[in-house]
Amino acid sequence: MSPQTGANRPADRIRTGILVALIAMLCTFADFGSNSANATETIDIRFPVRESEFDTVFSCQNDNNPDCRSCLADRPDSASLVMYSILQEALNAGGLAARVQVVPSPNSERSRKMVSEGFADIKSDWDFNIDADPEVLKSLPILRRGEVEKGIYVSQDTFALGSDTPVSDVHHMSAVSIRTWRLDWEVLESLAPASLTSAATKQQIYALINAGRADFTLLEFSSGPGMVRSSDGIRLYPMPGVKVVLPASQHFMISHALPNAEKIVAALNSGIDALHANGFIHQCLTNSGIINEQVRDWRILNPTEDQLAHHKTVPSN
């Protein structure tokens, strides 16, 4: 072994050590940069919207002015826009960089299948629909059980006759709804009207009431003047003083096929908690008419057990 070779070995080892350290450092920086990019990468979330409300939500999606997503502008009378706004805000509040993209759907049933089969990612739905589907996950509640209220909607003539004397029950009245509207149908059956007819479409409900072949149906309270609802020129009015509640909660259903679905649900839940706490969800629901402050003190014809317990008089000592 030559003295020169022996003398160079420590230097070689130092140079090799430095090189290894530099390579490790570069790999660390590369990993850090990659993780940072992934952390800030915007995720596209496909949100199915029924065709009748698609243009409204799509217009808001492409509007640079955030007012339409604040649930303050124009008091939007669109449930889809409300849920779109809550979803976008909840994902942001949960720390997730996400962009909600609306996709058209003919109806709620089709939207449900789109999420279940992975052709869409997230939609709002009732608890029983989500619980029955093993292909989806469920968020925390957006609307808690009993928070969704509906009015007893009647024709103008019936409204005029009963406006001074609010009904105490509907046993003498005939009802119409759509049998596949599960919650509405269950509530109507519990109210025991004189008769209950199933219509094929929402337009037919209006037509039957207008023609005097049914007295009332259940509809969400409108945020418009007088809370009037209209379809094809037919106007229906809420009977004053009474309302019903839907005995179920609404959540977001999330497709299992969505990459990192569990992490997205965790972020969504964190955001929903925050939006309940800061009042954003309540603001959306009241400004859209889903929760209507005008009927806060109206009597519930079908109170839940919790509501009965809450209103039960405490006996004095």
Image (cartoon, rainbow, N blue to C red):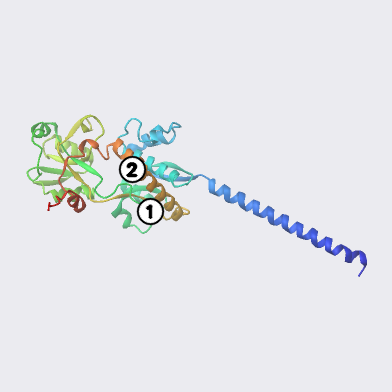
Q: Looking at the picture, which amino acid does disc 1 mark?
A: Ser
Q: Nearer the viewer, residue 238 or 315?
A: 315
Q: Secondary structure at mark 1?
A: helix
**Marks 2 and 1, Cα distance to the nearest angstrom?**
16 Å
Q: In the image, what residue occupies the spot 38% across and 50% down?
A: 114
Left or right: 30 with respect to 207?
right
170 in relation to 226, above or below:
below
Quarter of the view holding residue 210: top left
Q: Position of residue 123 (x, y in %)?
A: 37, 47
Quarter of the view holding residue 204: top left
> How many marks do you count on the picture?
2
30 in relation to 220, above or below:
below
Mark 2 packing: few (<14 Cα in 10 Å), some, or many (20+)?
Answer: few
Between disc 2 and disc 1, the foreground one is 1
Of callouts 2 and 1, the N-terminal one = 2
Q: Residue at the front extreme?
A: 317
Q: Looking at the picture, which amino acid does disc 2 mark?
A: Pro
Q: Nearer the viewer, residue 196 or 19?
A: 19
Q: In the image, what residue occupies the spot 10% across and 37% down?
A: 166
Q: In the image, what residue occupies the spot 39% across and 48% down?
A: 122
Q: Nearer the viewer, residue 270 or 157?
A: 270
Residue denoted by label 2: 106
The circle drawn on residue 116 is 1
Mark 1 packing: few (<14 Cα in 10 Å), some, or many (20+)?
Answer: many
Q: Position of residue 290 (x, y in %)?
A: 27, 40
Q: Secondary structure at mark 2?
A: loop
Residue 228 visible in the current orientation: no
Q: Residue at the left extreme?
A: 172
Q: Which quarter of the rendering shows the N terminus?
A: bottom right
